[in-house]
Image (cartoon, coloured by chain):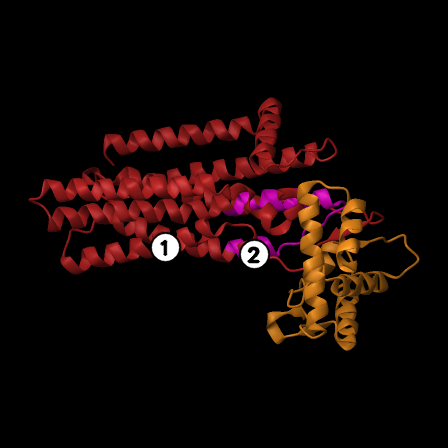
Chain colours: A red, B orange
Amino acid sequence: MNPSAWTVAALIAAVGIVMIARTFQPVSRTAQAESFARSVGLALPDSLRPVVTERVALRRRGGAIGLVAGIATTSFLLSMDPASSQYFASPFLLIGGAFAGLAVGVAVSAARASAPLHPDSVKYARPSAVRLDDYVAPLERAGGRIVIGLAVAAVIAAIVVGAPISGVLIGLVTLGVASLLFFEIAGRRIVDRAQPAQAPEDLTWDDAVRASVLRDMVTAPIILGADTVVVAGGALVDHLFADSELARIGIVVACVAAAIALASASLTSSPQRYFLTRLWPKAAA
Amino acid sequence: MITLDPRSPVPPFEQLRLQLLEQVASGELPAGSRLPTVRRLAEDLGIAPNTVARTYRELEADGAIETRGRHGSFVTTGGDAAEQQGQRAAREFAERIRQLKLPADDALAWAAAALKD
């Protein structure tokens, strides 16, 4: 890998390690739980504060461990490629690998979370089945599929026109498709998991944590797909419009505009509260 | 929401059956709603899967739900269409009153007066 790629890898790993450390500090754990409550628009009752704080910390720790593992694995695989020092796009793959690791980490943390029921307590359950669509906003769910579809199309187009295909591009598109499949399969498994509850609030908060895990998971294919489109698009533009600086600038501007439009749509639609409107409309009102 | 009280003298099967029937009748579980799988509801409530399976069988025999193979169990779409629409309108009215934070008693009085007009 080249020095810029090593710098990106080291920075991401450092962020991950700080995130892991913060999940062990009581002050940080409390602040993270309160921040999470604010982001989903729910009041955090004192009775649930310890449980929610623990769940939020577990999710963040799982994600951070996954992020560090993802960046370490991607760096190792890249450094195995003798040509990697010539890949200008290595940081894209490193960032994508980190998000893929984060997705696996939060999924593992969600699979390990459990809330044992007291045998004599009153139990609560939702009378209707839930689906992945109840937790992840259509913009994000469809966004992942569309961006990965565009990424695959861009790579195929690059191959068809004979543009140079680097190991980074192959890694990005492979990881992108794998992360989308992982989200679709593991996400359903998470949604199908039991939600033992001794109060309706238990169920609401379990839904909140579950939704945040699934949103973290769907971010990986979106990032990897976008990275692939940028790298494959760059290869295509270099190959097709090598003599036209204007065309190259135009493509870059179009990519930036698309990213800004997607980010704006995401921010204005409050996807972190989407599960409330689907599953707890009274709380969302 | 389904609640199950293990200390109740009413057996879990009956508690579950009555609540699901009530929610189907009230429209809280509208026609076409998919019920949780037997295993999932049993795990949620901490009861044996056989208890949930028996409840679903009884509800199916009553015509309240139907099983569509591997797709799961659904609230039946039969029944009086006009009555269902009336129930939906009532739920929407109640939801709007809650959003406006108006007293329920006043809302009921307005609805009663409107129906007499």
Q: Is residue A225 left or right of residue A213?
A: left
Q: Is residue A147 magenta?
A: no
Classify A268 as above or below B35. above
Q: Position of residue A275 (x, y in %)?
A: 58, 47
> Which label sits on residue A146?
1
**Along the viewing direction, whichever of A98 and A214 lies nearer the viewer:** A214
Q: Position of residue B95 (x, y in %)?
A: 68, 50
Residue B12 location, quadrant:
bottom right
- Give the amino acid type for the residue marked by disc 1 in the picture: Ile
Question: Which residues, given as a range, are shown in magenta?
Answer: A186-214
Cα separation between marks 1 and 2: 22 Å
Q: Is residue A199 magenta?
A: yes
Q: Is residue B60 visible?
A: yes
Chain label for disc 2: A
Which corner quadrant holds the N terminus of chain A? Answer: top left
Give the labeled residue for mark 2. A189
Q: Position of residue A43 (x, y in %)?
A: 66, 34
For mark 1, does the 10 Å Cα neighbourhood hold few (<14), some (14 to 19), or many (20 or more) residues?
A: some
SS state under label 2: helix
Q: Residue furthest left?
A: A243
**Along the viewing direction, whichever of A11 and A46 lies nearer the viewer:** A46
Classify A265 as above or below A26. below
Residue at point 81%, 65% (across, down): B17
Q: Residue furthest top?
A: A27
Residue at point 48%, 36% (across, down): A64
**Along the viewing direction, whichever of B52 and B99 lies nearer the viewer:** B99
Q: Is residue A114 visible?
A: no
Residue A189 location, quadrant:
bottom right
What secondary structure characterizes most of the magenta part? helix
